[in-house]
Image: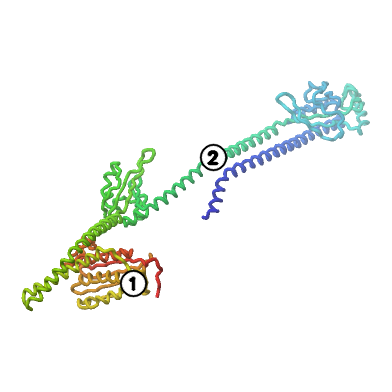
Amino acid sequence: MNKKTMRRNRTRLHTSPWIIIGSVGILLIVVVVLAYQNYSREKKYMSRILSEKGAAIIKAVEAGARTGMMGMMWGGQQVQSFIEETAQLSDVLYITVASDEGLVLASSNRGLIGTQMNSGFPEKGLDQPEEINWRHKRIDEQRSAFEVYRHFRPISHQDTWMGDRMRQMMQGRGMMMGPDNDWCFPSASGSGDQIILVGLNPQPFEEGRKEDIRNTAIISGVLILLGLAGFISIFWMQGYRSAKKSLQDTSAIKDQVVTSLPVGLIATDNEGKIAFYNSAAERITGLDLAEARGKDPDTVLPSHFCGLKESLDLGESVSEKEMECEFTENKIVPVSISASQIINEEGQFVGQVLILRDLGEVRRLQDEIRRKEKLAAIGGLAAGVAHEIRNPLSSIKGIASYYKSKFEDGSEDKEMAGVMIEEVDRLSRVISELLEFARPTKLNRKPSDINEILRHSTRLVEQEAAAKKINVQLNLASDSVKADVDPDRLTQCFLNLFLNALQAMENGGRLTVSSSAGINGDISIDIKDNGSGISAENSNKIFDPYFTTKPKGTGLGLAIVHKIIEAHQGQIKVRSALGQGTVFSIALPLGGSEPRRS
């Protein structure tokens, strides 16, 4: 995942709570708008239903009154009774007929007849006789009515002449007190227009509207809670992101630091199982710790943590304890070990940590320093001794030569004088080697073909090798590699190694000389024999001056070889085992120049 994608993901994660709050806010507005529209629609629907119901009741009352007047000679009393019966319908609160002056002519509530309607009476002079009007009217403090009203005409103006005839017939029969007192005949009585008012109960619709309002309030409350939860989640999210980023940074730093540590690190969990290790620990121990995760350390590492388990179990810490541990078979590694328990802030045991530091290189450098100090002391001593001994030896050789010439041939005295001369020569050679070793190595560098130097050196020992029935085999690099070296000094170095190999193969054998271009800008040379070999005890001493296992050796040959290789900024190592032969491995730098292929 690239940085741009990671940045986009972080932005999306950061803004998600705001998106939630915005969405909740928009949804809340939508719900409120829809609730308001639903409330208005319900109100409009209620008004239409109730107005239609009121209009139907008004028409029914008019039709009943008109039919009764025409067919059964009804008067105001009969219409009053009809109104009272009609008012018994469900959701009908009252039915009232009043004059346009507000005088109650008929009503479902008989107590209101003849009273004046002063409060909330409809405006005078309705424009359209058939037009239905409605309004909300407060009956008392607890009740309200949906009042529908319009002109009330049980006898139309076109039927006035018929109404007059009917009043006469009814009057003659004694059915009415008189035409002037019957409100059903407005034209006769002289009263104005009549208005019928029907009061309907809006309670069912009001309860429905209240239910809608209650549901809207509940939904709005839930949305507000969601918005608050989203708002609060911002702080939680910020805290979580901050903690996560801090943890990621800490983890990245930890991984980088632990991975880059030059020392080995092994950690166990609270159950004592291996939980963590780094590459340095694998390199030092030579173990594949990837397979060791989750296992008991005693099954992978040397028994009891190289003797540290008891101290760790007691809660003790170990600091820089040097010891030699055998991590794998036949591989003993000198290490410095530090170990301690891991305790968290609550005082709980979390695990153990083991830090390994490889002392192999330190030991090698220490040995190298001691060897150089020894060589420096020997070199200074050798220079003084050689100077003091060389002149007397010359005198002794001269006197021995004089006496040898005086004695007869074949005599014992002449033979003794010859032995004295030979011993003086041998001492002179030793002194020459001693001076050579003590003198600083001066190199006459020039570009030289290493393979050609090896061929030349092997030709110098071919006769001696053939005499001992030793086969000399060259496995040189196919491409000649030229390096900036001193060919004469390298020839001396190779000759010493070849002669040592021939002397180690008294009963014949094979001497193999190999060369190859290294991967680090150097050249590798291996000189291998299958002779008697060197013991492990003596392998660390063979480059020391005057150390030799040969009866007539001076012990300076390999010391000079080591000095020549060091002067070329190279390295020489030996691998050997008794009865299996010896391999000297030399690594020489190319003197800073690139390999030149021929």
- Residue at 23% x, 70% y is 501
Position of 390 compared to 80: left or right? left
Kind of residue indicated by mark 2: Phe
Choose between 506 and 337: the one closer to the eye.
506
Choose between 295 and 98: the one closer to the eye.
295
- Residue at 80% x, 24% y is 119
Choose between 386 and 298: the one closer to the eye.
386
Q: Secondary structure at mark 1?
A: helix
- Residue 583 vertical placement versus 164 (above, below): below
Q: Which label is found at residue 514?
A: none
Residue 93, percent across and down? Answer: 74, 28
Measure how far apart labels 2 and 1 are at the Cα level: 73 Å
Image-quadrant location for residue 120 = top right
Residue 190, percent across and down? Answer: 91, 25
| Residue that mark 1 sits on | 450
- Residue 304 vertical placement versus 422 (above, below): above
Task: Specify whether residue 163 is in view.
Answer: yes
Residue 167, percent across and down? Answer: 91, 26
| Residue that mark 2 sits on | 235
Crowding at mark 2 (Cα within 10 Å: few <14, some 14-19, many 20+): few
